[in-house]
Image: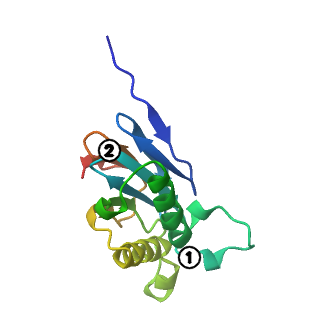
Amino acid sequence: MEQTLDIVKVGIADLKVARRPQTISTSGLGSCVGLVIYDDITYTAGMVHIMLPESSLARNTEFNPGKFADTGISELIEQLIKQGAKRRVFKAKMAGGSQMFNLSSQNEKMNIGQKNVNAIEERLEQLSIPIIAKDIGGSSGRTIEFDTSTFELKIRTVYKGITYI
C-alpha cells in the first residue's frame, strides 16, 4: 500500500507551518527566496516565500507580511511558536535568490534576488538563527520541499535537476 504524504503548499508571498510527518513546499522561486525555519526537537517547520527584502517597499499600509523578508520572518517565527516550536533551537535553510534577467554591472541594484538573500541573512543573524544550508543565486528557477521528519530540503532547479541540503 502506498503512503500518501500530507503536503502543505506555500504560495507566493505566503507562509505556513507544518509538523511531522508533513512536507511543506513552494514553487516559482526565481528572485524570490524560500526560507524554512525549523525546530528539530518538536519536528515543526515553517516556510515563507519571500518576494522583496523590506516592507518599506510596500505600496500601501495593508500588505501580506509573507511578501517581505523583515515582516515574513517575524510572522513565521510567531506562527512557529504558536504551534509549540522552541525559539532557542531554531535553524534555517533557504533556496532561491536567482538573478533571472541578465543585468549590466550598472544595474546591480536591480538584483532583487541578492537583495532578498542579504536581507534574510541579516535578519537571521540578528535573531541568532543559524543558516544550516542554502542553495542561492544563479539564473534558474527552483521548487523546494522540506521534510519535517528528516529536515531535508529537496531543491528542484530548472535545467539542473534535484539536490538535497
Q: Position of residue 114 (x, y in %)?
A: 42, 74
Of the image marks 1 and 2, the number of the one nearer the N terminus: 2
Question: Is 77 displayed left or right of 165 in the figure?
Answer: right
Identify the secondary structure beneath mark 1: loop
* Position of 20 relative to 77 (above/below): above
The structure residue drawn at horizontal position 28% and vertical position 68%, both measured from the top left corner, is: 130
Q: Position of residue 95 (x, y in %)?
A: 36, 59
Total labels: the figure holds 2
Residue at figure coordinates x 42%, y 49% from the top left? 84
> Which amino acid type corresponds to the residue marked 2 in the rendered image?
Tyr
- For the residue pair 84 and 80, the one nearer the viewer reads as 84
- In the rendered view, would you say 25 is above or below 142? above
Q: Position of residue 32 (x, y in %)?
A: 49, 62
Q: Quadrant of the N terminus?
A: top left
Name the mark on residue 20: none
Q: Is residue 52 visible?
A: no
Marks 1 and 2, how far apart in space? 29 Å
Q: Nearer the viewer, mark 1 or mark 2?
A: 2
Q: Residue furthest bottom?
A: 106
Pointer 2 residue = 43
**Residue 43: image location, x then y, percent:** 32, 44
Question: Which amino acid type is marked by label 1?
Answer: Glu
Disc 2 element: loop
Q: Residue 41 vs residue 55: left or right?
A: left
Outermost residue to the top = 1
As drawn, the label of residue 54 is: 1
